Amino acid sequence: MKLYWTMPTVIKKHYRKELTLYKTEFMQRNLAQAWHHLERAHILAQVWPREHSYVHWRMLSFGIHIKSGREILGQIPRLLLGGVKSFVGNVPIGNPGGANVPPLREMEIPEDLRQILSRH
C-alpha cells in the first residue's frame, strides 16, 4: 500500500492557482465559475490528504454560503473520510468532489489536469 503525504511542488503550484481562481470568482459572485475551480482543485488534490480535505472544507463552506442542504450534507462525509482515503491511496480518480456526483465514481480527468498530474 502506498501512503501519500506531500503534494509535489509542480502539482501544488497548479492546485494553489485553482484555489486563487476560486476565491477571485467567489468574491466577484461568479458562483458557477468559482465552483468549477474548486472541482479542478479537488481533482488535483485527491491523493494528498491535507489538500484533499481542505478542498472539501471549501466545498462545505461554499454549500453553506449558497444554502444548499444537499451540498452541506454531501460534503460532511467527504470531509471526514476523504483525507483518510487519500492517505492510503484509495480515491476515485477524476471525481470532482461535489455532492452532485457519487463519491466513489471514477471519472475522466480533463486533459490539462491529466498532464499536470503526470509530471509527478
Image (spheres, rainbow, N blue to C red):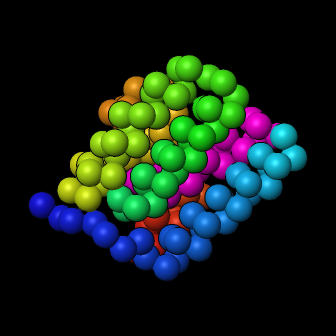
- Give the image location of residue 74, x and y in percent: 45, 27
Q: Residue furthest right?
A: 28
Quarter occupied by the N terminus: bottom left
Q: Please tell me whether residue 19 is drawn above or below residue 96 in the rendered image.
A: below
Comparing 36 with 120, the one in front is 36
Answer with the quarter of the image where residue 69 lies.
top right
- Give the image location of residue 110, x and y in percent: 56, 48
Q: Which residues are magenta?
A: 30-47
Comparing 82 with 72, the one in front is 72
Answer with the quarter of the image where residue 31 lies.
top right
- Give the image location of residue 23, x and y in percent: 73, 54
Q: Residue at x 31, y 69 (%)?
A: 5
Q: Please tell me whether residue 46 is drawn above or below residue 8 in the rendered image.
A: above
Q: Please tell me whether residue 1 is drawn above or below residue 22 in the rendered image.
A: below
Q: Residue at x 52, y 64 (%)?
A: 115
Q: From the viewer's perspective, is 102 left or right of 109? A: left
Q: Residue 33 lies in magenta, yes or no?
A: yes
Q: Residue furthest left?
A: 1
Prevalent SS, magenta region: helix
Q: From the viewer's perspective, is 42 left or right of 36? A: left
Q: Residue at x 59, y 73 (%)?
A: 13
